Amino acid sequence: MLIYAVRRLGSAIPTLLIIVTIAFFMMRLAPGGPFDREKQLSPEIEANILKAYNLDKPLYRQYLDYLGNIVHGDFGPSYKYLDFTVTDLIVAGFPVSLRLGLSAILLAVILGVTAGTIAALKQNTTFDYLIMGLAMTGIAIPNFVMAPMLALIFGVYLSLLPVAGWGGGALRYQILPVVTLALPQIAYIARMTRGSMVETMHSNFIRTARAKGLAEHVVVLRHALKGGLLPVVSYLGPATAAVITGSVVIESIFDVPGIGRYFVTGALNRDYPVVMGVVIFYAVLIIALNLMVDLVYGFLDPRVKVE
Amino acid sequence: MKGKLWRSGWRTIIFIACVLALFIVGTAVAGGTLRIACMGEPASLDPHKVTSQWENDVIGDMFVGLTTEDPKTNAVPGVAESWTVSQDGKTYTFKLRKSTWSDGTPLTAHDFVYSLQRILKPETAAEYASLLYAIEGAEAVNTGKAAEDALAVKAIDNYTLEIKLTGPAPYFIQLLTHYTAYPVPRHIIEKFGKDWTKPEHIAVNGPFKLVVWLPNTHIKMTRNDKYYDAASVNLDNLVFYTQEDRAAVQKRFRAGEIDVARDFSSDQIDWLRTNLPKETHIAPFVGAYYYPINCSITPFSDVRVRKALSMSINREAIVDKVLKTGELAAYSLVPPGVSHYEHPAEVTWKDVPYAARIKQARALLAEAGFTADKPLLLTLKYNTSENHKRIAVAVASMWKQIGVKTELYNAEAKVHYADLKQADFQVARAGWVADYNDAQNFLYLLETRTGPLNYSRYSNPAYDELMLKAEVTFDLDRRGELMHQAEALAMVDQPLIPIYHYVSKNLVAQNVVGFADNSKDIHRWRYVTLK
């Protein structure tokens, strides 16, 4: 398994290189530069600024310089947040996104798997339909509707929770963003779990387990769940990456200082180093999480041999 | 038995719920801390690197220049206690008060020489340096044609500063309140370079000092007891929240988490007027919203086409039905109430009833060669925003009445401004907010020598000549008259279509005292008290 992991990590490097290259050139293709504003700059001042940021060099030169820098861990300055480097921004934002994302996924897994399993066990009863109905609503209502609604109810009308802000990570500031982030995931995971558990519960090895006289809860928890969770595990890899790198909407509505917003604001501001920084970061995260998922898969399903 | 258990169970539940609720609700704000939503993350806290309104909110109480604003934003003595002006209006001599930076280092005239040289040096790449071009040598230094000591700013002694201008600039004392003219601490910058603005290094000369800056979270400042007028400052701390989502900020304001919100969404105006009338502040603002027309291409080089397009717009409908936040319909470029320019030059057809204007517009287009079979086709460009879209849609339907077929095209801000800069448009949306309270700051947009900022590429020698004459006229009223004549010419030619003049929108909690509405929408927190 170790060799497999090392091999996977090794093949990640050319993947990253391709991603960096495509992102770099695509960013430059977009019209408009980082310093175009309503109040126009005189040509001399603009020339000064471009020179200060090495934007006057030919494109291939900028690309090679950039590659050289990132190998040394220097992701460059931000063109918009002039007092900070890209590393400063990511280091400040990532722990927040991580905390938020992991809490959301954890909540989603616990609630989603429980709800899905119970629905599968009570298949085609009212409870099942209720759960699946709620799940559908959770998927259908977009988070930019859910978030302001929850903020209004709990923050403004009931004054139970703060409307927005991060408060240094205090619990009460986390509740609304985590719940809003988790809701669609709970829904997906519940539906997925239900579907896969229904299938698993009808398989032969479960019949054998029952025939052996095992108690029902042992059959479900020790035997069926492992197999039933396989699709959920595959889903969790990219889902965790997506949730951790943050939802721009959640961050903007709840004023959470994560790194999700840098994807969008970086692109809109043509803040090239920030965009490149978060793209690379996201790519590394997805690669790592996918690897983890594959390893967990091997652990869960004895039929899969990780070679 | 069951009943009794149940009751005690309920009591426990209620008790726990109350404790939890108290825990969650949290503490109210401590007296002396003002929480402000400044509607944007500052690009930097270095006065030489910033360009926008929201940065002004933050740094404007960290640093004080030679002159500073009073609550109504009139220029009053700042670090300079007094000043004299030479007969020809070109030499200003400032007497500075004895004051220090927040770390105790004395603040002298040499600091101002250093700061003005620094912002104009090409290496600083300051985007707003051109604001100081009124100072002799400034443009040469900034464009790399001269060394920084060519700048006509000299320290006669530690507390006397002399500045020479290229010509009499009546707005100069006003101009010095702007952040481009703030002093910056040389001893800190030389030691820490780019990191000088970090809380552990920074030194300020203003009423508040930076304590914490977490990007995209908040900025915290605390009072600076070494500020020369610290005794008059009431607040202890300032906290700035940089969230940009106006709907969320409004909710936070309602929940009491924010004391001042520096903008709100226009579509909320009816709700706010009904539910928070005392907190909703709307005031005229020195800004203009207009549609430049590209005069360098046909058929827009034809003044009849431009006049027809302008006449057929019902500005009152836009202001009253689309915007509804008290904006003023504009028939001139310069907003009313600008210093020494009370009444701008408006279009001659302002009082013609709308129906008659439509008829005249149709006639003009026909004269210019456009008929029902050969209608005028144009593309109207604007930068993506809900309000710009609504106005563009309204204008397109007004133009339809005179037989013009409009295509709407929106792009994000960077792309839009790049297009304007390159004259890659037919008719587009633009806005302009004054840097200082003077008509010249608007009218120079139509001078030929202005270059890319003159989006319409309007070039009228008579206009240019009047503006040049005004530049060297010391008598402020006479100068105003000359500029008025120039604006009148432009209003006949309509190289741009004025649409409306801005208003400032703020939400201010009722216990905030000292927040004075003004036409520059500048608010210095040193004058604010929390009741």
Image: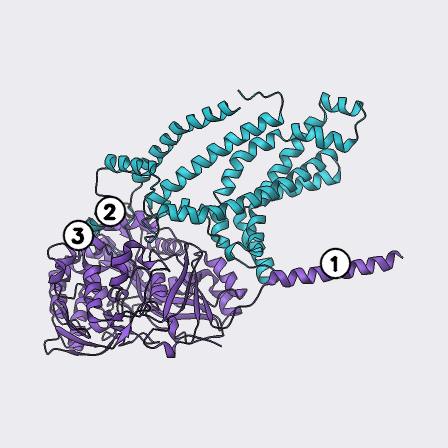
Chain colours: A cyan, B purple
Residue holding disc 1 = B13
- How busy is the neighbourhood of tag 3: few (under 14 within 10 Å), some, or many (20 plus)? some
Gap between marks 3 and 1 measured at Cα: 71 Å
Gap between marks 3 and 2 measured at Cα: 21 Å
Q: Earlier in the sequence, mark 2 or mark 1?
A: 1
Whether pointer 3 and pointer 1 mark residues with C-beta atoms closer than 8 Å, the reply is no
> Outermost residue toward the right?
B1
Give the residue displayed 50% in from the left and 23% down from the top: A4
At mark 1, the secondary structure is helix
Question: Which is more foreground, mark 3 or mark 2?
Answer: 3
At mark 2, the secondary structure is loop
Residue holding disc 3 = A44
Considering only vertical position in the picture, is B369 above or below B113?
above
At mark 3, the secondary structure is helix
Q: Residue under mark 3: which chain is it in?
A: A
Callout 3 amino acid: Glu
Callout 1 amino acid: Ile
x, y (%) of residue B39? Answer: 41, 60
x, y (%) of residue B504? Answer: 38, 67
Question: Which is more foreground, mark 2 or mark 1?
Answer: 1
Regarding residue A47, the answer to whether it shows in the image is yes
Q: Is A259 situated left or right of B25 in this image?
A: left
Residue holding disc 2 = B424
Question: Which is more foreground, mark 3 or mark 1?
Answer: 1
Callout 2 amino acid: Asp
